[in-house]
Image (cartoon, rainbow, N blue to C red):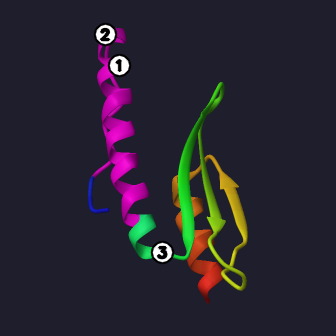
Amino acid sequence: MGTAPAARPSAAGDDALFRATVFEQNQERVAALQAEFPGHQISRENTGRGPRYIALSRKPGVRPHTLITADLGEFGDELRRGQA
């Protein structure tokens, strides 16, 4: 999770590369969160408005039961708060 965010593209042609880089970085972060929170099933869903991250508890008593957000930073923070 130590990867720096991708820089915004300077030209329209760079946009696809930027999106691919952000997607790859987010996939790494999602994989790290899955390793950190094995009690949750974590997935990424593509919507017409961008990605949405979903966590579902795998067994009773794991908190939060369900978490859905488009903000990956908030997603990790809320999962950590649920373990506190």
Tally the marks.
Answer: 3
Query: Which residue occupies the foreground of this view, 72 or 14?
Result: 72
Question: Looking at this view, is 25 or 8 the one in front?
Answer: 25
Callout 3 environment at 10 Å: few (<14), some (14 to 19), or many (20+)?
A: few
Give the alpha-carbon distance from disc 2 to disc 3, as whole Å: 39 Å
Callout 2: SS: helix
Tell which circle, 3 or 1, labels the residue nearer the N-terminal end. 1
Residue visible at 62% across and 54% down in the picture: 54
Identify residue type, mark 1.
Ala
Residue 7 placement (x, y as % from top left):
31, 35
- Considering the numbered disc 3 on the image, is that residue within a helix, a strand or a loop? loop
Q: Which residue is mark 1?
A: 16
Q: Which numbered disc, 3 or 1, marks the residue closer to the eye?
A: 3
Residue bearing mark 2: 13
Image position of 4 (left or right of 36): left
Reading the image, the residue beneath label 3 is 38
The spot of residue 28 in percent (x, y) is: 33, 53
